[in-house]
Amino acid sequence: MDESRLGGFVDIPGGGFMMGVDPVFPEEGPPRKVLVSPFQLQAHEVTNSQFAAFVADTGYVTEAERNGGSARFSESDTPEVFLSWWSLDAGATWRTPDGAGSDLEGRALHPVVHVTLNDAKAYAEWAGGRIPTEVEWEYAASLGLFDPMDPESGVRAPDGGMRANIWTGFFPVFNSRRDGFDGTAPVGCFEPGLTGAYDMIGNVWEWTDTPFAQAVPRFTIKGGSYLCSEDYCRRYRAAARESLEVDFSTAHIGFRIVRSKEGTDEPG
């Protein structure tokens, strides 16, 4: 992505679409027709440099910094045990993404991580936007697909070339880095979707402002991340969804913001 486009938005026209198409997991369906008002979508995930400007201007302190760290992924000696992949690292924050002693050197254009939904909302308000609803997010991602008949066309081209930053290889034991990365990638390293937005699929999961399910105190995240793989979760699709508590953060969740178009109700 051209750095001159940093912080730019793309126009998403209003319309209708089928949400939850080709569900792989039960929580993704059933398919249903949804109408969406037009809105503007930030063309890329919010970067470390953008978040740093927010913090410098407001003095904001993230929940990970206040409440004892954030979750980090690491390769495990017992990969068959899901909980062994993740640990709460007291030194992991947006400023120190790999834990104590790490920093943002060379990562200005990487997506900010270790931010909660509350942190993301605070940034969005400062930046004059808001966090997208799940409907808005999935609609924009669906419009951006290179082949609307192929829900995985956002992650790979017909010739097998990579269109997104995901886990390639045998998860969680071996990452071949066929896409060029084994962690987050700078925003805009892969070709944009048909809407002009980058990294809607892969790189980091993105917060939405939509509860995941009734009676579940979690909010929905969309898009998959650099930890999504072909042989494990396959959540690098527009319809895929996961959830997290609003005050929790991880190394593979970030966000982007939207703005309502003038003359329309919000959210779309």
Image (tube, rainbow, N blue to C red):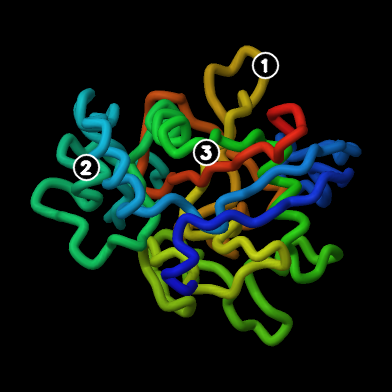
Q: Amino acid at mark 3?
A: Trp
Residue count near mark 1 (Cα–Cα under 10 Å), binned few <14, some 14–19, many ≥20: few
Residue at 69% x, 29% y: name it.
Answer: 267
- Between the C-alphas of marks 3 and 1, the distance is 18 Å
19 up-or-down from 238: above or below: above
Point out the residue furthest to the bottom here.
159
Residue at 33% x, 45% y: name it.
Answer: 51
Q: Which residue is mark 2?
A: 92
Among the two numbered marks 2 and 3 on one chain, the one whose residue lies closer to the N terminus: 2
Label 2 element class: loop
- Between the C-alphas of marks 1 and 2, the distance is 31 Å
Q: Which residue is mark 3?
A: 207
Residue count near mark 3 (Cα–Cα under 10 Å), binned few <14, some 14–19, many ≥20: many
Label 3 element class: strand
Horizontally, is 137 left or right of 83 in the view? right
Label 1 element class: loop
Q: Which residue is mark 1?
A: 214
Among the two numbered marks 3 and 1 on one chain, the one whose residue lies closer to the N terminus: 3
Residue 115 visible in the snapshot: yes
Q: Amino acid at mark 2?
A: Ala
> Which of label 3 and label 1 is nearer to you?
3
Percent of width and height locating residue 183: 36, 63
